[in-house]
Image (cartoon, grey):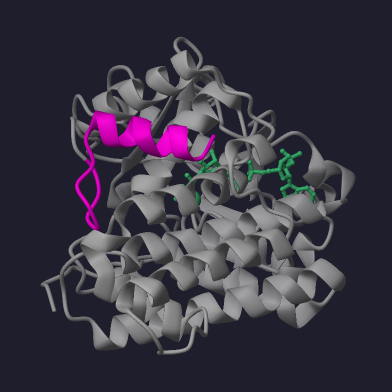
Amino acid sequence: MKSFNYYTPTEVVFGKGTENEVAGLLEKYGAKKVLIHYGGGSVIRSGLMKKVTDKLDEAGIDYLSLGGAVPNPRLGLVYEGIELCKKEKVDFLLTVGGGSAIDSAKAIGYGVANEGDVWDFYDHKRQATACLPLGVILTLAATGSEMSDSSVITKEEGLIKRGYSSNYCRPKFAIMNPELTMTLPDYQTACGCTDIMMHTMERYFAKEGSMELTDALAEGLLRTVMNNAKILVKDPKNYDARAEVMWAGSLAHNGLTGCGSDGGDWASHKLEHELGGLFDVAHGAGLAAVWGSWARYVYKEALPRFKKFAINVMGVEDKGSDEDIALKGIEAMEDFYRQINMPTNLRELGVEASDEQLVEMAHKCAVGVGGVMGSAKKLKEEDMLAIFRACK
Ligand code: NZQ
Ligand code: ZN
């Protein structure tokens, strides 16, 4: 087992009606002037925003709001939020929404708490030294951003989607009421389940490390999400299935399922970020579209992990050669994606990419990762291009 630092400072308040605790939590964490940040309006249509502002009004907490965070959230709105927060002397950010609104708030928080251009952090030119404190009322189980150290922003100029991680942006609290996810379109629920699983799979497909406990947690989480994702396809209002998925979403990306590994692989995520940047696809669907091609490209280099995954997660029989078992595990995963109506290639994702665009994405990806990425197999630009071509 490799050495690790496990840091998850976020207070989780989980269950039915927990959004009613928002004012008490804001007071507990010292909020005096709050910016409520949200997305395209689903939280207004569902009535959640009114509930939240009523609670803040009752408690006499000063606030203003800024909506408009889109999936693959844009830098332009981040700049707007930073200016607004500085002008209004905001000292706390409250996100009501999914990963995009949370990430947009994290970027605003960096921009307010640090001098200079906030994009520098996403461009990996320098490190942040602080972030405005933030809290979350989660409406979509997917990214794990409600507990994670990361945020992902897209710069309009050049359509560059980049992530930045630091412990400063970990939310102070995360309110998670699984009922709030019941208004989601089925597609977003499935995208969320895919993303949750991928956060654990990226950590699982590390080449090195003996991680008996971490592997068992990861495998249990993956089986749980698969079971409940299938339930939600037929019964989207099933509270227990929503709850299992929501909690899995946080644990999949708060570091727990990577303790003791070499940091994980993350190639599928990096490839998806190029797709999201150029074609504005939903993150989870983009991951499903590239994963099979990535897995077939790398599995021989990390055969024991792929074999273990096939048997312990996908239920493949321990019979035949290791390669056969590993390949059956990959096929079973793709079957699962089909069962929850997720794509397994770019065409099914609705992306008609020209070869020039694949070349462009591979190049941007290589630049973004500094040349090489991956743990199961080290991938260079030509490998990235080969995977994009394979999943066309
Ligand atoms: O914008 P609104 O109107 O709220 O609608 C959203 C959006 O259209 C809708 N939605 C959310 N909750 C809803 C709802 N609709 C009805 N009822 C509800 N309860 O769902 C759509 C997608 O929302 P979004 O926030 O974009 O989705 P998600 O949570 O999947 O976030 C995706 C973004 O997070 C990044 C992705 O790359 C992508 O940009 N990621 C962030 C990570 C992190 N910070 O740790 C890690 C991930 O790997 C990921 O890269
Ligand atoms: Zn993800």
Depth check, front residue: 316 or 195 = 316
Extreme residue toward the top, this view: 157
Write down the quadrant of residue 100 in the picture: top right
Quadrant of image for the N terminus? bottom left
Depth check, front residue: 162 or 98 = 162
- In the image, what residue occupies the spot 72% across and 65% down? 339
Write down the quadrant of residue 120 in the picture: top left
Query: As displayed, is residue 345 above or below residue 315?
Result: above
- In the image, what residue occupies the spot 53% across and 65% down? 331
- In the image, what residue occupies the spot 40% across and 73% down? 324
Extreme residue toward the front, this view: 320
199 with respect to 193 (left or right) = left
Give the percent coordinates (x, y) of residue 15: 69, 77
Q: Is residue 26 visible in this depiction of the protein? A: no
Query: As displayed, is residue 112 above or below residue 25?
Result: above
Query: As displayed, is residue 342 above or below residue 6?
Result: above
Q: Is residue 389 magenta?
A: yes
Give the percent coordinates (x, y) of residue 43: 79, 46
324 with respect to 304 (left or right) = right
Quadrant of image for the C terminus? top right
Give the percent coordinates (x, y) of residue 340: 72, 62
120 with respect to 70 (left or right) = left
Give the percent coordinates (x, y) of residue 3: 11, 72
Q: Is residue 343 magenta?
A: no
Depth check, front residue: 328 or 181 = 328
- In the image, what residue occupies the spot 33% across and 81% down? 215
328 with respect to 129 (left or right) = right
Q: Is residue 166 visible in this depiction of the protein? A: yes
Where's ligand 1: which quadrant?
top right
Magenta-colored span? 373-392
